[in-house]
Image (cartoon, rainbow, N blue to C red):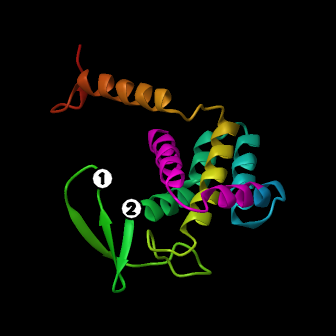
Amino acid sequence: MYYLINTILEVNTALNTMEGAEQATQAAHAQLKANKGPGAQVLNECRAALADDLNTPAAIAAMSATLRELNDLLYTRKVCGIEVKHCRHANHVYTVYSKSLCKTQPFQGRKAADRAQRLALGLAVIQQAVDMLGVVADQHTLDDLRSKALARYEGFDNENRVPYM
């Protein structure tokens, strides 16, 4: 859940600095409202999972490819056919061979010509799916999840993998 909310906040920040983001956001919402495209398919999978005895793990799993693409659009640069990924949690760079996350167009990460449109559509999909789950995706929720994870970690004996008594 932390990864999901963090991605939403980072995409919002990126879109606020991009030209044409407002038009891209409007087009994304129109596409989802018309129930067309891959974004609508992801939302339909989330709805189906939630209708099946409130299967939240399946609903979150339906969003995984969209989340992966959003993070690649935020942090990946393609150089000479090789993706260069910058890890935002450490000061290192590593490379992986480029691959396409979208079957219809080659993946280009931060250099993609339609980056704003893809970010806006992915954000709209993820926000609607999170709304279906009933989660408020804001900085306060993210901070709360972080503090709970740290509190759990501090009360855990890492050598023996058991909670402290």
- 160 vs 78, left or right, is left
Q: Is residue 159 left or right of residue 4?
A: left
**Among the 4 quarters of the image, the one containing residue 20:** bottom right
Residue 89 coordinates in the image, percent (x, y):
27, 49
- Eyeballing the image, is 115 above or below 3? below
Is there CB contact under 8 Å for labels 2 and 1? Answer: yes
- Part of the protein shown in magenta: 1-29
The residue indicated by pointer 1 is: 88
Among numbered discs 2 and 1, the one appearing first in the sequence:
2
The residue located at (50%, 40%) in the rendering is 5
| Image-quadrant location for residue 156 | top left
Find residue 36 and report its horizontal and vertical position in percent. 79, 64
Residue at point 23%, 65% (across, down):
93
Task: Identify the main secondary structure in magenta.
Answer: helix
Cα separation, mark 2 vs mark 1, equals 8 Å
Instruction: Name the residue rendered at 44%, 78% in the picture.
Output: 99
Q: Which residue is mark 2?
A: 75
**Residue at position x 60%, y 58% in the image:** 21
- Residue 35, horizontal then vertical, whole percent: 81, 59
